[in-house]
Image (cartoon, rainbow, N blue to C red):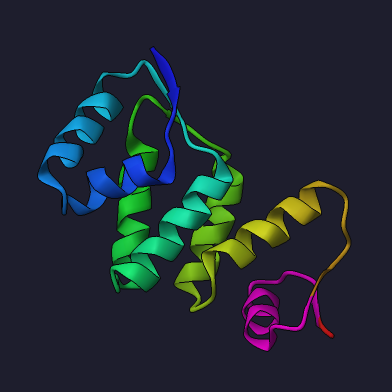
Amino acid sequence: MNITADTNVLIRAAVQDEPHQARQAAELLREAELVAVPVPVLCEFVWVLRRGYKRSASEVSDAIHRLMKSANAVMNRPAIEAGLASLKAGGDFADGVIAYEGDWLGAEEFVSFDSKAVSVLQSQGVRARLL
């Protein structure tokens, strides 16, 4: 069976705060032949873990790396790596993903009113401008 995992399935498996759902999620993720993990799901995953569960950037990064090591998980790995690099640099995962995908789509620079996002991305060599 090939599935697309929603954010709440990944959260249950990672956090284990609802025992029945956590078992269901872990079993499904383990047994699926292919688990498609769309980029927006990981953006939500990071947001929920950081804001809702108050997990550190390191804990969130570790959870994503565990998922990436799963033999059956498929995702846009370069975009996810860009998000993880931004998270590691003290920025937002989603900003790294957005800048990466914008570049992939042909954009020449990331623009934002968010000074922290621009600063973090610039520190990574991304062409970014504060509006």
Q: Quarter of the image containing the C terminus?
A: bottom right
Q: Does the magenta stretch include residue 36?
A: no
Residue 112 pos. (x, y %): 77, 77
Q: In this view, does 129 lie to the left or right of 66?
A: right
Q: Where does residue 2 sit, x and y in percent of width and height?
A: 43, 16
Question: Is residue 110 in view?
Answer: yes
49, above or below 105, in the image: below
Rendering coords of residue 105 (x, y %): 83, 47
Q: Is residue 112 left or right of residue 42?
A: right
Numbered disc total: 0
The residue closer to the viewer here, 86 or 93, is 93
Q: Residue at x 88, y 62 (%)?
A: 108
Q: On the picture, is 51 further left or further right than 108?
A: left
Please give the name of the residue rendered at 55% of the width and 39% of the height, measured from the top-left corner.
38
Residue at screen point 53% across, 64% down: 93
Q: Which of 20 and 75 is in front in this view?
A: 20
Is 123 included in the stretch rendered in magenta?
yes
At horizontal 25% and vertical 49% (from top left) the residue drawn is 14
Question: What residue span does the magenta drawing correspond to?
Answer: 112-129
Image: 70 above or below 32: below
State the image coordinates of residue 72 (x, y, percent, origin top left).
Answer: 37, 24
In the rendered image, the quadrant that contains the N terminus is: top left
Whether residue 57 can be seen here:
no
Q: Nearer the viewer, residue 123 or 97?
A: 97
Left or right: residue 15 versus residue 51 is left
Q: Is residue 87 above or below residue 67?
A: below
Q: Which residue lies furthest to the top in this view?
A: 1
Q: In which quarter of the view is residue 70 placed?
A: top left
- Image quadrant where residue 113 sits: bottom right
